[in-house]
Amino acid sequence: MTAVPLFTPIKLRDLTLRNRVGVSPMCQYSSKDGFATDWHLVHLGSRAAGGAGLIIMEMTDVAPDGRITEGCNGIWDDAHVEPLKRITAFVKEQGAAIGIQIAHAGRKASMSRPWEGGKRLLPGEGGWTVSAPSPIPFLPEHAPPHELSKDEVLRVKDAFVAGAKRAVKAGFQVIELHGAHGYLLHEFLSPLSNKRNDEYGGSEENRFRLLLSIAREIRADVPKDIVLGTRLSCTDWAEGGLTIADTTRLSAQLKKEGVDFIDCSSGFVTADAKVPFGPGFQVPFAKEIRDKAGIATAAVGMITEARQANDIVAKGEADMVFIARAMLRDAYWPIHAAIELGAEPDIPPQYLRGYEANKFAQPRKKAV
Ligand SMILES: Cc1cc2nc3c(=O)[nH]c(=O)nc-3n(C[C@H](O)[C@H](O)[C@H](O)COP(=O)(O)O)c2cc1C
């Protein structure tokens, strides 16, 4: 059998992923007081059984006011670790590696769940005060966020570091910092949302300071084998916002701080962005950062087909491909893609009977 690039293993530090297909982080709005539930076990567990190489658990917030909704997952309390352990153990048993995206929603916090309208929750409706680098609301109808003081910025940094240490205790192998989509860390990076005039705003060096210092402290505080990634909005798609040239420079600095891969997304810091959505529209960012910053990248966004995903890896445009909505439609996307591409699918032994007619059906390989 000739090697199929999407299904060749990749090594990140000491962690070997069985293939290059990742489940992109996706909020489930199904946590209670930040605690993961059986929903997460089933949702992430199914996708591990479905053959993904890496699963990144949803945006998981390092402070209660950093949640988008009250259903968001949390890691601000030691007590959050226990239910996560069950999930990480099950995912690993299925041969997938397990990661977690740690985050703070910044000025985009205090909303109702998407299926409850996705609207701003006012304090009287169970909402809370939102914080940001500068008192500029995302949309004019939102209340201006509280401008974080320097002490509060340092507390946010400490909360990320504490969250990362809890993630290690919970059994996660990969920690991804959420530096994208207009949430707090991206709000510091982008000149559109950061109008501060202290050492966390103004120049590029100042705007990048918070994310870089969080990466540095986490790298120093977690075991060497923990893989550290960062999701970036590689461009803001808006006049005066971040460009791919900016985020390429940032990626090179993150690499120096010990970050192992960049997950290349884009946009969502301003409602005025003009985004050319289309199949694989963010892939060029993964290639540019991979080529120019010399760091491993994941491509994400409107990648739905097996051949499309395989070509991205085959052409050296990215090291991994992360898939979100197509994985919601089909938890077995990786097994189905492997069969379509003529690679050996990693089918759970319990399900082999469903594939008996398939010449590639093999007993599964040893867990990672
Ligand atoms: C239900 C849902 C929840 C999401 N939650 C997150 C999240 O927690 N963190 C994040 O960085 N992106 C999140 N995203 C964005 C996805 O990770 C992904 O970047 C985006 O959907 C584009 O990929 P796709 O075209 O394969 O869906 C979410 C997307 C969906 C559909």
Image: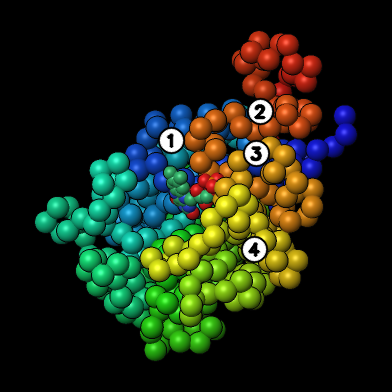
Of the image marks 3 and 2, the number of the one nearer the N terminus:
3
Answer above or below: position of 305 versus 181.
Answer: above
Identify the residue under disc 3: 305
Question: Where's residue 256, x and y in %?
Answer: 67, 72
Q: Earlier in the sequence, mark 1 or mark 3?
A: 1
| Residue type at numbered disc 1 | His
Q: In what quadrant of the picture does the N terminus appear?
A: top right
Image quadrant where one finds the C terminus: top right
Mark 1 within 8 Å of ligand 1, using the beta carbon: no
User: Which residue carries the number 1 mark?
Assistant: 40
Q: Residue at x 74, y 16 (%)?
A: 358
Give the CA distance from mark 4 to mark 3. Answer: 19 Å
Asked if disc 1 and disc 3 are in contact, CB closer than 8 Å, the reply is no
Identify residue type, mark 4: Phe
Mark 2 burial class by Cα count in 10 Å: few <14, some 14-19, many 20+? some
Return the residue at label 4: 285
- Identify the mark at residue 89; answer none if there is no mark: none
Residue at x 79% of width, y 16% of height: 359
Kindly indicate the quadrant of the structure image that contains residue 159: bottom left
Q: Is residue 121 left or right of residue 6?
A: left
In the image, farthest residue toward the left: 124
- Local SS, label 3: loop
Q: CA distance from mark 2 to mark 4?
A: 27 Å
Q: Give me the C-alpha separation between circle 1 and circle 3.
A: 25 Å
Q: Amino acid at mark 3?
A: Glu
As displayed, is residue 113 above or below residue 236? above
